[in-house]
Image (cartoon, grey):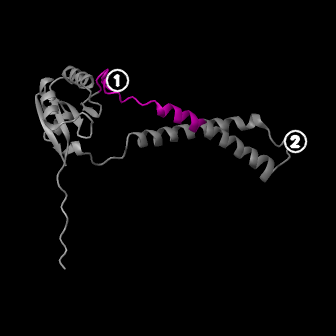
Amino acid sequence: MAHHPTTIEPKLRGHIAYYDSPEALLEAAKKAREEGYSKMDALSPYHIEGLVEVLKQRDDRVPKFVLAGGVLGALGGFFLQVYVSAIDYPLNVGGRPDISWPAFIPITFESGVLAAALTALITMLTLNGLPRPYHEVFDAPGIERVTDDQFALYVMADDDKFDADATREFLASTGAVSIQEVIS
């Protein structure tokens, strides 16, 4: 019995429209949001004020995780010191109490800062889906110019409103310089 390797059929992942200016990209994103598109992304060589709000990609979970990580780290540092000083290896030096909390403050603070910083890093990477060595939009023709002087709006095919022809026509009506299919 012969084994035949399976081939993966290329699939339409969306449309990417290129623009010459950040203003044109911002305006196109606003129109796409008003039209009802929700699964889209913008690519730009630099930050464009207001674009995150238009795309509704703001995520306020990171500060909450950082606060929780900092508090848990501080509590962990404090209770580790209590355990070592009062339970595991108590030393009575000069008649001081086993749980001398003022002496625990520097380590408590530092463990809280360390835990908050590590939580911020891990949460940010996780919520951004990083590391991501590959994304289907990297296959789009002309995408390399986005890091230099081009601006792009990527409408994903898994958007409820996405229709290959209608979306292409809509993106053309926003003043796109060119529109490409993203296939991978």
Image location (x, y in percent) of residue 183:
17, 46
Circle 1 is placed at which residue position? 53
Image location (x, y in percent) of residue 29:
24, 25
Q: Outermost residue, bottom direction?
A: 1
Question: Could you tell me what secondary structure mostly forms the magenta stretch?
Answer: helix
Of residue 133 and residue 110, the one placed in the foreground of this image is 133
- Residue at image position (19%, 32%) is 148
Query: Disc 2 and disc 1: Cα gap in Å?
Result: 61 Å
Is residue 145 placed above or below 80 in the rendered structure?
above
Image location (x, y in percent) of residue 120:
49, 37
Of residue 113 and residue 58, the one placed in the foreground of this image is 58
Q: Secondary structure at mark 2?
A: loop
60 is within the stretch colored magenta: yes
- Residue at image position (13%, 37%) is 180
Quadrant the N terminus occupies: bottom left
Report the side of 143 relative to 125 (left or right).
left
Report the side of 117 relative to 78 (left or right).
left
Question: Would you call the spot at circle 1 few (<14 residues within 10 Å), some (14-19), or many (20 or more)?
Answer: few
Report the side of 94 relative to 69 (left or right).
right
Asked whether residue 110 is in view, the answer is no
Instruction: Provide the residue span drawn in magenta.
Output: 47-70
Say what amino acid the circle numbered 1 marks: Glu
* Picture quadrant where residue 142 is located: top left
Is residue 86 placed above or below 116 in the rendered structure?
below
Count of numbered badges drawn on the protein: 2
Circle 2 is placed at which residue position? 94
Disc number for residue 126 = none
Say what amino acid the circle numbered 2 marks: Gly
Report the side of 19 relative to 57 (left or right).
left
